Amino acid sequence: MKRKSVSLFLFIIAVFFAVACGKVDSSVNPETVIASVEKTTEDLVVIKVDTAGDCEYLVDIMAYLQDKEALTFTTDGAGMVSGINGQTNPADFSCCWMLYTSDTELSNAAWGTVSVDGVTYQSAAFGAEALPVADGTYYVWQYRKF
């Protein structure tokens, strides 16, 4: 149990620093983007990016999808995604939205994996505000309990 607590703490610190470096690009042209929410449940959201267009980071894609009313999300003061579709992280982080991706260059199994429809995704190396998006990539948000 102590290892999980330490690991969660280190993850939160890593996400904070990764997110602090990212920024939302408000000059994104939505006509250049082709992205969709492929699957959504209470604790899972699968985003597919066919064409990132002007979007540089995953948070830009999420803002695009929010504008299209395909999902909703909130961030905390530091930029960390704190809620998706009304499901929010509690203050004690006993549950948390975790980000996974099919982009093998920007992921690893350090924070685990998630399987969706027979496909396994590794944890993203950055938070949504610092994770560069790539055409043809899947991004999976899973609400996990610790």
Image (spheres, grey):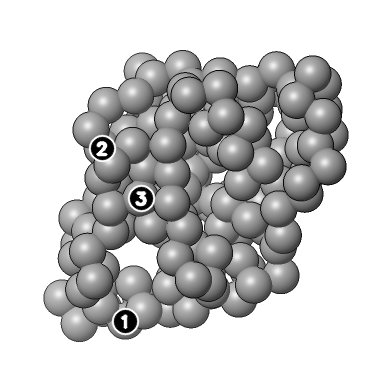
Whole-angstrom CA distance, mark 2 to mark 1, is 24 Å
In primary-sequence order, the first of circles 2 and 1 is 1
**Which three-letter amino acid code belongs to the residue tagged 3?**
Gly
What residue sits 71% from the left and 39% below the top? 133
Whether residue 106 can be seen here: no
**Which three-letter amino acid code belongs to the residue tagged 2?**
Asp
What residue sits 22% from the left and 64% below the top? 90
Q: Position of residue 2 (x, y in %)?
A: 20, 82
Q: Give the numbered dot on residue 43.
A: 2
Q: Position of residue 78 (x, y in %)?
A: 53, 72
In this image, 80 relative to 53: left or right? left
Mark 1 neighbour class, 10 Å CA radius: few under 14, some 14 to 19, many 20 or more:
few
Whole-angstrom CA distance, mark 1 to mark 3, is 23 Å
Mark in front: 2 vs 1 = 2
The one of 67 and 141 positioned closer to us in this rendering: 67
Q: Give the numbered dot on residue 6.
A: 1
What residue sits 70% from the left and 62% below the top? 22
Of the 4 image quadrants, the one containing the N terminus is bottom left
In this image, 76 relative to 5: left or right? right
The relative height of residue 121 versus residue 94 in the rendered view (above or below) is: above
Mark 3 neighbour class, 10 Å CA radius: few under 14, some 14 to 19, many 20 or more:
some
What residue sits 28% from the left and 42% below the top? 86
Q: Which residue is mark 3?
A: 83
The relative height of residue 70 versus residue 25 in the rendered view (above or below) is: above
Element at badge 3? strand
